[in-house]
Amino acid sequence: MTKDPPRKTIYRLSTYQRCLARLLANNVDTVSSEALAKAAGVKPTQLRKDLAYFGQFGTRGLGYNVSMLSAFLNEALGTSRLQPVILIGVGNLGAALLRYGGFQKEGFEIAAAFDLDPDSANARNVPFPIRSAREMPAFVREHHVKMAILAIPAISAQNVVNEAVDAGIQAILNFSPTVLQVPGHVIVNSVDLAVELENLSYFIR
């Protein structure tokens, strides 16, 4: 890898990986940059530029070896082995995330779920034991967890994130409708459903 790729490139790597997974499922051995770029919704030049951050891939006239490129992207994205993730906040959204069965298929494993009121959270019919939020920092340190999903009210999000970061969390998927302040080494991806709907609304005429 020559230099750190932009975050948008990392997003696109995930898209490329899903396209490659479909090709593997259909027993396709090789794919051209044009075909892979079209499946991913980007230009071939963008695809080649993104991959160039990580080295040289493909053979002129033959394209990319699908299984080899997929294995490399899995390694680059850290999903070649199950990545432990904690979930903080088991309200309606958190419970729905726990019931989602696709995380493990994509290389992620919910290692633990935490809530201020674990007894109430357990009543939401989730197939997972819920721990007290007070146990979260110790669990993160003991199990060396680096990723967290945050699904709690905005009013308490910053304090909880401060505890999680102090314990060793380095990457956060944030569903709380607030802007989080974190140190420079911590990455936050925020998902604000209202903002996303507002953005879509602009295109409805």
Image (cartoon, helix red, strand yellow):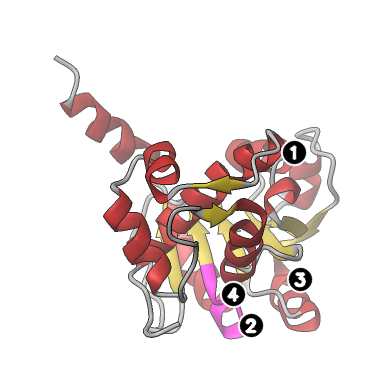
- What range is drawn magenta here? 165-171
- Quarter of the rendering containing residue 137: bottom right
Residue 7: which numbered mark, if any? none
Closer mark to the observer between disc 4 and disc 1: 1
What type is the residue that disc 2 sits on?
A: Ala
For the residues marked 2 and 4, what is the alpha-carbon distance in whole angstroms? 5 Å
Residue appearing at x 53%, y 70% in the figure: 171
Q: Secondary structure at mark 4?
A: helix
Mark 4, residue position:
164
- Badge 4, how many Cα within 10 Å: few under 14, some, many 20+? many
In the image, which is nearer the foreground, mark 2 or mark 1? 1
Q: Quadrant of residue 69?
A: bottom right
Marks 3 and 2, how far apart at CA: 11 Å
At a point 61% along the width and 35% down the height, the residue shown is 92
Where residue 174 appears, x then y in whole percent? Answer: 47, 56
Q: Which mark is residue 101?
A: 1
Question: For mark 3, what is the residue?
Answer: 135
Of residue 137 and residue 61, the one placed in the foreground of this image is 61
Mark 1 vs mark 3, CA separation in Å = 25 Å
- Residue that label 2 marks: 167
Where 37 sits versus 187, above or below?
above
Decide whether residue 170 is among the magenta residues: yes
Kind of residue sitting beneath label 3: Glu
Mark 4 and 1 residues: CB-CB less than 8 Å, in contact?
Answer: no
50 vs 41: above or below: below
The x and y percentages for residue 190 are 41, 55
| Residue situated furthest front in the rendering | 61
Sequence order check, earlier mark of 3 and 2: 3
What element does badge 3 sit on? helix
Query: Which badge, 2 or 1, comes first in the chain's sequence?
Result: 1
